[in-house]
Image: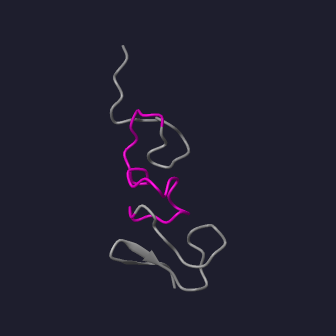
């Protein structure tokens, strides 16, 4: 049985570690809909795999690259 959404919190059977910390269960500390295993910054709800990448020195979309394909970049000619 996989994780389920209850409100905005994810819960897991007592046998699964969805926080990638060795403990069982799951918690979404910033309540953005992603557990720590999925979220590269579980203390900031604006940073998650579904976020738009912005030119701010942060990996907003958790793809491992900072400021790539930003939505607010200025065009260079």
Q: Is residue 34 magenta?
A: yes
User: As displayed, is residue 19 above or below residue 24?
Assistant: above
Residue 72 falls left or right of residue 18 = left
Who's the residue at 53% across and 85% down the image? 13
Q: How many numbered discs sit on the rendered protein? A: 0
Name the quarter where the C terminus is drawn.
top left
Give residue 28's quadrant in the image: bottom left
Give residue 17's quadrant in the image: bottom right
Q: Nearer the viewer, residue 32 or 67?
A: 32
Q: Position of residue 44 (x, y in %)?
A: 43, 53
Who's the residue at 44% across and 45% down the image? 60
**Magenta stretch: helix, strand or loop mostly:** loop
Q: Where is residue 69 in the image (x, y as percent from the top left)?
A: 42, 35
Residue 72 falls left or right of residue 19 = left
Residue at the limit of the structure toward the top, as seen here: 77
Report the colour scheme.
one colour
Who's the residue at 40% across and 73% down the image? 9
Residue at the limit of the structure toward the right, as seen here: 22
Give residue 4's quadrant in the image: bottom left
Q: Is residue 4 magenta?
A: no
User: As displayed, is residue 68 above or below residue 46?
Assistant: above
User: As displayed, is residue 14 above or below residue 27?
Assistant: below
Q: Position of residue 56 (x, y in %)?
A: 42, 34
Who's the residue at 53% across and 40% down the image? 65
Q: What's the magenta region?
A: 31-57
Q: Position of residue 21 (x, y in %)?
A: 64, 67
């Amino acid at each position: 049985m996989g994780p389920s959404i209850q409100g905005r919190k994810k819960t897991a059977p007592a046998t699964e570690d969805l926080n990638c910390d060795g403990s069982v269960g799951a918690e979404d500390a910033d309540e953005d809909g992603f557990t720590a295993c999925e979220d590269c910054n579980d203390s900031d709800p604006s940073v998650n795999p579904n976020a738009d990448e912005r030119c701010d020195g942060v990996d907003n979309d958790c793809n491992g690259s900072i400021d790539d394909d930003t939505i607010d970049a200025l065009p260079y000619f």
